[in-house]
Image: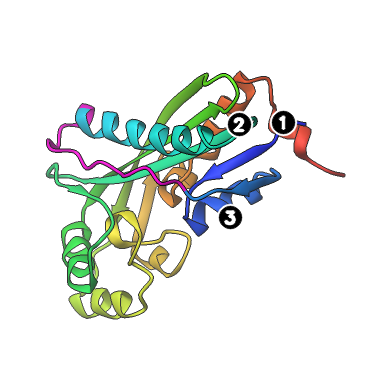
Amino acid sequence: MVHLYLASKSPQRKALLTQLGLSFKVVLPLAREEHPIRSSGSSVALVVRGNAYRKASEVANRLEEGLVIGGDTLVVTNRGKVLGKPKDFDDALAMLRLLAGTWHRVLSAVAVVDANSGDHQVDIASSIVFFRKVSDIELQKYVETKEPLEKAGAYAIQGKGVFLIEKISGSYTAVVGLPLELVAKLLDMFGVPVWKYWTK
């Protein structure tokens, strides 16, 4: 059985991989994330793909064998502003005010790197999320829960942040932070179908 590693400090990504039925170890990546200079769709996609690969590759370089999974997610507003993780409470509130009552795009990339050979595969999912109209006091109360911190776009669709959502078009798990359909696809490209990790 091929050993799997998750290059992430995100509890959401850990929970998603567990949901997929995979057995893996978490190794915190030391690679720095880049932020796009321009807000065009192509430049953001390149940055997200690059961040996912750098995380997985950095961890893979510290291992002798196994497949390393890395991920990265950014949010782009309907006006082209790129949102990463908020710096603080005020930044989180500002992000949510931009998103409320409109739509935004979530770009979420997955990279898989073979620690032995260095071979790698990277792919990206794009989802559209529609926020309902909410009052400013609702946004403030949500920020006070601290859930928006450390989340791209300052919300967690899998948590209390679901109250903001009107609908989504695309991958739900991509919005959470790791598109599982791409994880399964990329692992299969390395000859490691996810069902091999399932126990009866």
Q: Are marks 2 and 1 in contact (CB under 8 Å)?
A: yes
Viewer-closest of 165 and 156 = 156
- The picture quadrant where one finds residue 53 is top left
Q: Position of residue 35 (x, y in %)?
A: 22, 42
Residue at horizontal 33%, vertical 67%? 148
Number of numbered discs overlaid on the protein picture: 3
> Horizontally, is 88 left or right of 186 in the view?
left
Is 6 placed above or below 124 here? Answer: below
Q: Is residue 38 magenta?
A: yes
Residue at horizontal 20%, vertical 61%? 95
Residue at horizontal 70%, vertical 27%? 193
Disc 2 target residue: 67
Disc 3/disc 1 C-alpha distance (Å): 20 Å
- The picture quadrant where one finds residue 87 is bottom left
Viewer-closest of 144 and 32 = 32
Q: Dot 1 surroundings within 10 Å: few (below 14), some, or many (20 or more)?
A: few
Q: Main secondary structure of the magenta part?
A: loop
The part of the chain drawn in magenta is 29-42
> Horizontally, is 1 left or right of 38 in the view?
right
Disc 2/disc 1 C-alpha distance (Å): 7 Å
Q: Is residue 150 magenta?
A: no
- Image quadrant in which the C terminus is located: top right
Res 2 label: 1
> Horizontally, is 74 left or right of 60 in the view?
left
Disc 3 target residue: 15
Res 48 label: none
Q: Position of residue 119 (x, y in %)?
A: 52, 19
Disc 2 element: strand
Disc 1 element: loop
The amino acid beneath tag 2 is: Leu
Disc 3 element: helix
Sequence-first disc among 3 and 1: 1
